[in-house]
Amino acid sequence: MKYSIITMVFAFLGAITTFAQRPPFISSPDVHPDSRVTFKYYSKTAKKVMVSGEFLTAPQAMTRDTSGLWSVTVGPVEPDIYPYSFVVDSVQIADPNNKYIFANERFKRSIVDIPGKTTLEHSLQNVPHGKISYRYYKSKTLGTTRQLLVYTPPGFNSNGTKKYPVLYLIHGGSDTEETWTKVGRANLIADNLISQGKAVPMIIVMPYGNVRPAPMPDFTKDVVNDIIPFVESNYPVLTDSHHRAVAGFSVGGGQTLNIGLTNTDKFAYICSYAPYTATEEFQKNFSNYSPDANKVNSQLKLFTISVGTEDFLYESVKKNIAMFEEKKIHVKSYIVPGGHTWMNCKQYLTTTMQEIFKN
Amino acid sequence: MKYSIITMVFAFLGAITTFAQRPPFISSPDVHPDSRVTFKYYSKTAKKVMVSGEFLTAPQAMTRDTSGLWSVTVGPVEPDIYPYSFVVDSVQIADPNNKYIFANERFKRSIVDIPGKTTLEHSLQNVPHGKISYRYYKSKTLGTTRQLLVYTPPGFNSNGTKKYPVLYLIHGGSDTEETWTKVGRANLIADNLISQGKAVPMIIVMPYGNVRPAPMPDFTKDVVNDIIPFVESNYPVLTDSHHRAVAGFSVGGGQTLNIGLTNTDKFAYICSYAPYTATEEFQKNFSNYSPDANKVNSQLKLFTISVGTEDFLYESVKKNIAMFEEKKIHVKSYIVPGGHTWMNCKQYLTTTMQEIFKN
């Protein structure tokens, strides 16, 4: 009886949309206790529907029942958080019935969370939680007001009795300021590591790294001249380089190298994940790089570059590492299995968070 | 030169996705100074592409150039924020190149913001900004940890020297806890009205109103027994009924009536927007409603019901208003032009925020 009334609500609300036929209520994805996952999609007109995901080696076809409900069950899938999409007659779409969207400005994909039998570092656990704040700041560099996200740890108090170190954390090339929380679960990784005493309580600032049509170096200026001053005037933070870190993935991993290594007086921790470095800014900074290695090594507490052996940038990143080694810069490399994915990203961040602000 | 390198970055990154052919970088939507809007979509295989939006009376066909770029320019469009989607060979999708998504669990649409020649109440203006925090709370009622959003106003300080009134603001039937900020811009409406002295500084709590498969009355319990205590133990707030308001849209408008009118000792302000009331909970509470009208009227500082004359619930809402009037409950009705839309929702909230916590 209760269900039938709820169904009526949606049937009725459905009538008001632009499309006369709102599909029935569908639960997708359904993650089963044995780590298999059922995906569903409703269409009476589609000829072929597939699910494509980073847990599959190839897209899997769904089958249709007489009502127009398409579905497929896959797996068991290795516990993790994965992006996926549906391909409906060659149109790639996010799962309409899944509210968890991959935050991105060039594609729309959904997210599925396969819980582990043991708790994973990115899972929602019964520990104290920090919070994520959405803030606006004025960028003089870019001449506009921009949004960034700020994670403050459990027990955070703005009264200034405790001051915190700050990690500046940058997303990949077509991602947004939300990708590190919505896909990377940076907030939950921090909650979990802090509660276990594996990471120190820290503030994490997640800016929006894309500055199109401005040139990329303007983002470096934005971080140094606009974002850091905004954070330091709005949060109780430690302002010396030993309490400031920068990290980022892919294009953001390249930005991390540019921002960090041109500002070693400001950042003692530089952690670059699968950096994309075929950029004009990187060329300018590093094609004739001749650092005072002793000075840089004394300024930096930790400089790491992470990459997966299946990453399409693996060879390029190995060259980056070799270049820094050749210049006698102390760089710690983390070479792990996996590709250019947010599954790997979460691992890189989990490692980084346990190493920064500790020595 | 700069552009070509950026283009290379994306071409290169594109190669790693599941789909071999990542489309070229496309800017969509493009809002022109004269309030016309150009929508673009890339597909070499589609046979027909249309844009469908709440600013159009009917979907508009896009035309294709030889490269596979589909586009159409529409308008001028009355300045506002509108949901829209593309229909690609009968598959409805969000605009892949627009990062602004309508937060919803049953469909994926995009958002386009047409700025006005004069500033609109929901626009990003050069005023002090509050912040939105994403928080987890434990719901004993629902036996789980849930997310809610909390807006704190400009100048907010958690040290307790100033205590704030609280508006509990509920989304529509298939929306999420993010819809009031991402589509309704509740935070910017508050920033603007507070900076103009038209609204008092307040905290706005935006919970997730769907409790499926639990029965709907459990959300009423969740608000009263879990959310309010969470807010009151984590924020410096005034805890008497004269400093507590509840408002909501559609299914959330119905929830507002249920939550508010069964708890008039807790909420002195009840503002219901285009309520959907054909629910078991509403039936139970109001089919044999026999209030002590004098008592309720003395408890309530403001009770409003808003609806648009083109709203599919218009006749139903008029009956709701008549029912409360018949029971001698003082209800203020706001009948305005417009339909069951988030454009109307923003108007309702703008009106509400200027009236609550003032008398």
Image (cartoon, coloured by chain):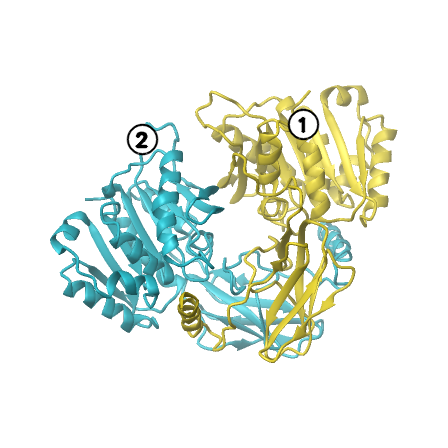
Chain colours: A cyan, B yellow
Q: In terms of depth relative to the viewer, which is nearer, B336 or B213?
A: B336
Chain holding disc 1: B
Left or right for A273, reference B9: left
- Res A125 seen here: yes
Q: Which residue lies under the disc numbered 1?
A: B356
Please tell me if label 1 and label 2 are on a single chain.
no
Left or right for B20, reference B42: left
- Image coordinates of residue B1 in percent, x first then y, are 40, 68
Whole-angstrom CA distance, mark 1 to mark 2, is 36 Å
Q: Does A275 appear above or below B210?
A: below
Chain holding disc 2: A
- Image coordinates of residue B187 in percent, x first then y, are 58, 39
Q: In terms of depth relative to the viewer, which is nearer, B154 or B205?
A: B154
Q: Residue at x 67, y 27 (%)?
A: B356
Disc 1 residue type? Ile
Check whether the beta carbons of the residues at disc 1 and disc 2 lie within 8 A of each other: no
Q: In terms of depth relative to the viewer, which is nearer, A109 or A49?
A: A109
Disc 2 residue type? Lys
Q: Which residue lies under the disc numbered 2?
A: A162
Q: Residues within 10 Å of mark 2 (few under 14, many from 20)?
A: few
Q: Quick one: SS at disc 2?
A: loop
